[in-house]
Amino acid sequence: MKRVVVDAFGGVDQLRVVEEPTPEPGAGEVRVVLTSIGMNHADLMARRGEYRLMSGEPPFTPGLEGGGVIDAVGEGVNAGRVGERVVLGASAPRSKTDGLYGTYRSHYVVAESEVVTASDALDDIELGTLWLTYLTVWGCLVWKQNIQPGQLVAVPAASSGVGLAASQIIRAQGAVSIGMTTRQAKADRLAEMPEAMFDHIVVTKTPDGQDADWRKQLKEITDGKGVNVFFDPVASGHFLDTEIRSLAKGGVIWVYGLLGDVGPVDVSPLIVKQAAIRGWLLYEVMGDAAALQRGYTEILDGFASGAFKQCIAQTFSLDDVRAAHEAMERGDHIGKFVLAP
């Protein structure tokens, strides 16, 4: 089989593709031939040494998502599962004593309980792209926040895979979505994409790269009432400061990333607004078995009904993993990057 190894923290030159014997599944395990490996910014952070809680120390194999076809089963597993299309469970990629057992590989051996039967509505390239996008959104906005019809939900980084998934889930809940992006060119592309189900799109930068008056834009969109929920991976400095001032009474800023520039933040408006800033990690829903199963079901049902549709920005072979990381770091894409072994 093929596997990607990070030999040392650093640039893309630290990514190496190796050939090694294909592993056999043990008792209670299945082997999945991966047709789809979803790429995430967490993979880049792990390579650079910025996500050691998950990656451990090199050498390790990155990758937090995957899906494909079961091609072998171990003792105690029904042989009839061979040929079944599955998605790896959200907790399947895991840290081990010898580093992250990630999904950047052609074959993945995992406990039978850690695979989820795939919907026929998902094609082979979509199989490994679900949980880090859709479950991240669903867990926060549906399970924790319980967004309601008519509420105004703003989504910075609207062109990301998570941002696009958010637009679809917000619409499915009957709420109003406001996509936020830094460039007019991206806003124009989002407006034309069926996967981008935003009710409004706000551009946060001027053509020369300066901050636009996006607080004014939000005020106009919300008729002066403010935003009920921000679902935000930027969340720092001036950006967070403006979000706080743009909140409605009782509003919430959910922070799931820290992509912005560090800077001072005035939290005093939170007092008058009776508002809050809260952090979100996907691992919270992964720790609740009932919630996790509900999330799996609702997301797969969304794809089956056509309410959800993954936007694949570009597909790379496993051998082209360095080029894939370089392209993701440039940030010119809209949607999800996928490795297809």
Image: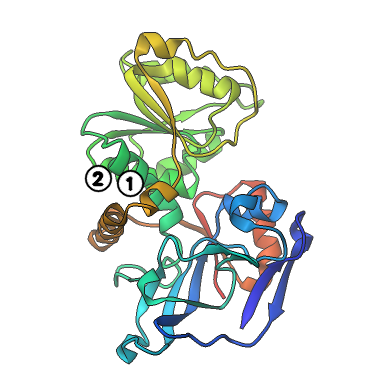
What whole-number distance in Å separates the C-alpha atoms at marks 1 and 2? 6 Å
Q: Position of residue 170 (x, y in %)?
A: 30, 40
**Mark 2, residues whose alpha carbon is within 10 Å: few (<14), some, or many (≥20)?**
some
Image quadrant where one finds the C terminus? bottom right
Residue placed furthest toward the front: 97
For the point 25% across and 45% down, which residue is it?
172
Q: Disc 1, disc 2: CB below 8 Å? A: yes
**Mark 1, residues whose alpha carbon is within 10 Å: few (<14), some, or many (≥20)?**
many
Q: Position of residue 195 (x, y in %)?
A: 38, 50
The residue tagged 2 is 172
For the point 33% across and 13% down, which residue is it?
224
For the point 22% across and 30% down, which residue is it?
150
Residue 245 occupies quadrant: top left
Q: Up-down: is 74 above or below 222?
A: below
Q: Up-down: is 217 above or below 86?
A: above
The residue tagged 1 is 168
Question: The residue under label 1 is which amino acid type?
Answer: Gln
Residue 24 appears in the rendering? yes
For the point 70% across and 51% down, which residue is it?
49
